[in-house]
Amino acid sequence: MNTPVPAPFGTRTARVMFTALFGELALYPTRHDPVRQQDAFSLFYGRSMDLGLLTDERLERSGLWGMNDAAAGEAAGPPPRVAWFQVGVTGNGLAPVVPFLAVAAAVITRLGRLRLDAIQVLLPERGKDDRSQVDDSWFADLDPSLRVPVRVTLDAGPDEGIYTEAPAILERIQTQDVFRCDSLHLAEEDHLVLRPIPFEHPGDVHHRVTFTGTLAEWSLDALGWLAALLDDAASRQRITAPLLLTADTSEGAA
Amino acid sequence: MARRPGGRCSAGSTPVRWRRSHGRHRAYTVLHKYALTSIPERTIVSARGKSIATLTQDCRSSMPARGGRRGVAAPQRPCPHIRPTERKSEVRTSSSLTRGRLLAVAVAASAALTLIAATPAVAAHTKGHQQVADTVMGLSGFSSASPPPARTVIQRVSTGPIQVSRINSRTRTPQATSSCTWDPTQTYTENYSAQNTLTEVLVQNSDEPSCTITMSALSEVANIVTPHTGTHNIGNAKCSNCSSLPVYGSYLCSAGLQCAGKWVAEWTVVQADPPGWFFTSWPAGCTPNLLDTVLTCTGSAPETVPPYLPCSPIANSSSLHISSTPPDAASGHGWWLINDCAQTKANVTVQLQEFFSNGVWYDIGSPGSRVVYGGITKSPGTSNQASARVLCSSTGEAAWRSVVTVTLPVQPGHGTYTRPGENIPCSVPYPGAAGSARPATAP
């Protein structure tokens, strides 16, 4: 009789979306009610539920993601990682990174005062035909003085196709004005690498490309929009591997 | 049903009940005693830890006394107070009896509330009595939208068959025989809050010993056990604890958790035979006098009023996932929602399971277990969660799931939830026969 081996069950495969915020977070005082005490996990879960974004079979809720984990107030670095959020995307198609970061922003605003220096966003694997409508109208009338220089690194892990597809990705993202890309960098020293790298295994290889330019504003909203833009562009260029987006700004962070 | 004359709650003698039948006086007394005792394992303490041990308090209610049915003045009743031991009642003969034949002297016992736990004598007293306790329980739904639940328990004490015979005075042989059974009943209506916490107890005493006569012609015997008329309220919501308990009638204990515990209703029935009749057999709980013409029967029915009804805590969990922090590990968090429970803290356990090619889920790793506060409608913070984590042996894809159980420490309540499996790039080898197999279910 053969020894049983680990096996999948059904077709439900988790696609992890993750973000980590780096900078400084001054937490507000919390109430000492042990029952109602909130933290990043419970706030993210609750806000996602309130907005109809949470999938929770136990409570018969259907949304865009299931809650994995979250934490805030941790300090490691430099730069210090002050909060992180992790969900399992429950639907097909490109990951809902815009609402994901919007909820993260809402949670952080509730928890304390954040000075965001840099961000990691793990975009889960995508299908070759996944598309999204990335509309820049939300940022169209922003005060030009809010525009900040940014550096954005895409890490495709073992998928070296990111090198060959990067110019096409650059060309695709030139059709909007939220992120004005000035240049594409392939040199290792130009990449932005923040640690810890989520889900990294010893010996993992990284294939990275970096875009520099200006962003309409330095906010989680704009960064979520940028992540969605690059996710869509990568999909159109047949990049299916998970992408770790890392971004920072060389000017004063918000 | 006619009301008897009432009396003020004051010290006095124990009532003697009289009635005239067929030109003869009959007398009997049905006496009820109530006892409330704490139950150690129940910990009669409020959810906020407030002690409810104080049990003695003066009766503040006007307590109508039982009076004679036909104009016989009712003696005043003693105000029942809690006493650590039973209070002996005096034997008294009504002056009205002097006009007729005295057939019986009623012996009344106390109306004292006795703490059974501290008074083993009561338990011993009840032991050996023929006793039938019928319990009818009805529980309403547990949804918070439902009206507060209630529980109704009917306790019945049966003295068992008592045989009465008319005996030929010369031959001393029975000429006619009948039998009778007294079975006073008591109804407990226990009301609970939406969180299933005891709010009040209404004790309604039906002190009407019914009697089934085996020979219908023996009407004299039937008259012996003519029922008492109904009950009357002697307690009310102003009684702030359970110290004042009735001898007869209804009692409302509105002190919430203080009302929880073991209640014991005791009945003593004193029965006198008509002339020429004798008791010829009786159950163990009865004691005849020397002439076998007066029989005293006792019985009791205990009822345990639970401080909490069962509730339905909701177990829930995060989606099973790989922890972002190296090394790779399958991870799951569990919590619970209070729902209709009064208690806010419970033990939550999370057990991870992995699926194998033989179609079986196996427990993998140690369960995570914590005593944590429950959430109201959503997940509580991580400080109120239990977590389980299993290091991955490889990144091969396998299905994992978590089983979360929640158990309340005092209030009866248990919940479990098995979250649908997730295929994640994490696996550990087959645990072998040592692993506890779980049947596979649909994801």
Image: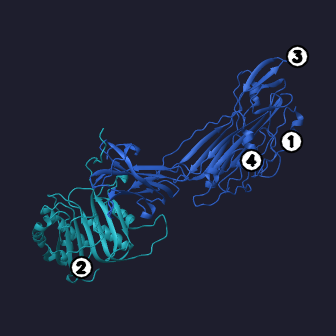
The chain displayed blue equals: B
Task: Measure the alpha-carbon separation of dots 3 and 4.
Answer: 48 Å
**Gap in angstroms between the C-alphas marked 3 and 2:** 121 Å
Residue B279 percent across, percent down from the top left:
80, 26
Q: Which residue is mark 4?
A: B119
Q: CA distance from mark 4 to mark 1?
A: 27 Å
Q: Which residue is mark 2?
A: A249
Q: Which residue is mark 3?
A: B170
Q: Nearer the viewer, residue A116 or B27?
A: A116
- Residue type at numbered disc 2: Thr
Color theme of the render: by chain
Mark 1 or mark 4, which is nearer the start of the sequence? 1
The answer to whether marks 4 and 1 mark residues whose Cβ atoms lie closer than 8 Å is: no
Label 3 CA crowd tier, 10 Å (few <14, some 14–19, many 20+): few
Secondary structure at badge 3 equals loop
What is the chain identity of the residue bearing mark 4?
A: B
> Is disc 2 on the same chain as disc 3?
no
Foreground mark, 3 or 2, reads 2
Question: Circle 1 marks a residue in which chain?
Answer: B
What label sits on residue B92 in the rendered view?
A: 1
Q: Are marks 3 and 1 in contact (CB under 8 Å)?
A: no
Q: Which numbered mark, 3 or 4, is in the foreground of this view? A: 4
Q: Which residue lies at the image location 63% right of the left edge and 54% below the top edge?
A: B44
Q: Secondary structure at mark 1?
A: loop
> Which residue is outermost to the right?
B98
